[in-house]
Image (cartoon, rainbow, N blue to C red):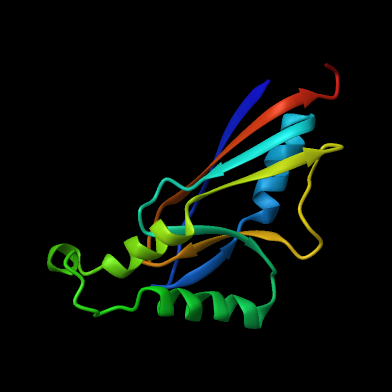
């Protein structure tokens, strides 16, 4: 069985950490999958998808760390087009997809793990997260 969902959201800052965990959990519950996989994909060239701790300080540190990976105004060639090469590089290095096991009808996240989309080129009115849930339903 495969179920596909889409989560739409906006961002309000140039760089921002959005917690999408509860929205993804709602889709897993709706799917009735007991055992399987949750595939997450953010179809954006300037966003980042991570699994990590939901603590105020570390969320600031995610943004600081990404800035160190690819600082703005670094004489990037792509900046001649739209001045956001740093955002593309962050996305390419960290990634826009994650896979999470589903066990007993729930995401098998670690104790301190949540699902975050990190905006690196905002604000954006419309961002998306594609959620594909594969697995065996309770009644199968």
Residue 3, image quadrant: top right
Q: Residue at x 83, y 39 (%)?
A: 103
Q: Residue at x 36, y 73 (%)?
A: 70
Residue 82, image quadrant: bottom left
Q: Residue furthest top?
A: 140
Q: Residue at x 77, y 23 (%)?
A: 136
Q: Residue furthest left?
A: 80
Q: How many marks?
A: 0
Nearest the viewer among 118 and 110 is 110
Nearest the viewer among 29 and 63 is 63
- Going by the image, does 115 lie left or right of 85? right
- The correct choice, above or below, for 69 with respect to 7 in the image is below
Q: Residue at x 19, y 77 (%)?
A: 75
- The correct choice, above or below, for 18 with respect to 37 in the image is below
Nearest the viewer among 3 and 102 is 102
Indicate the position of residue 61 as horizontal and vertical percent values.
56, 80
Q: Quadrant of the C terminus?
A: top right
Indicate the position of residue 24 as horizontal and vertical percent values.
66, 47
Q: Quadrant of the N terminus?
A: top right
Indicate the position of residue 131 as horizontal and vertical percent values.
58, 39
- Going by the image, does 74 lie left or right of 109? left
Indicate the position of residue 94 as horizontal and vertical percent values.
48, 60
């Amino acid at each position: 069985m495969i179920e596909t969902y889409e989560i739409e959201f906006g961002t309000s800052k140039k760089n921002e950490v959005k917690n999408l965990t509860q929205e993804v959990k709602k889709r897993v519950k709706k799917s009735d999958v007991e055992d399987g996989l949750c595939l997450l994909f953010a179809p954006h060239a300037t966003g980042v998808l991570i699994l990590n701790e939901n603590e105020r300080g570390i969320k600031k540190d995610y943004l600081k760390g990404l800035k160190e990976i690819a600082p703005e105004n670094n004489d990037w060639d792509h900046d001649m087009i739209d001045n956001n090469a740093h955002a593309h590089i962050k996305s390419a290095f960290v990634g826009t997809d994650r896979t999470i096991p589903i066990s007993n009808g729930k995401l098998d996240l670690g104790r301190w793990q949540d699902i975050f989309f990190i905006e690196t080129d905002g604000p954006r009115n419309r961002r998306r997260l594609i959620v594909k849930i594969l697995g065996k339903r309770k009644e199968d």
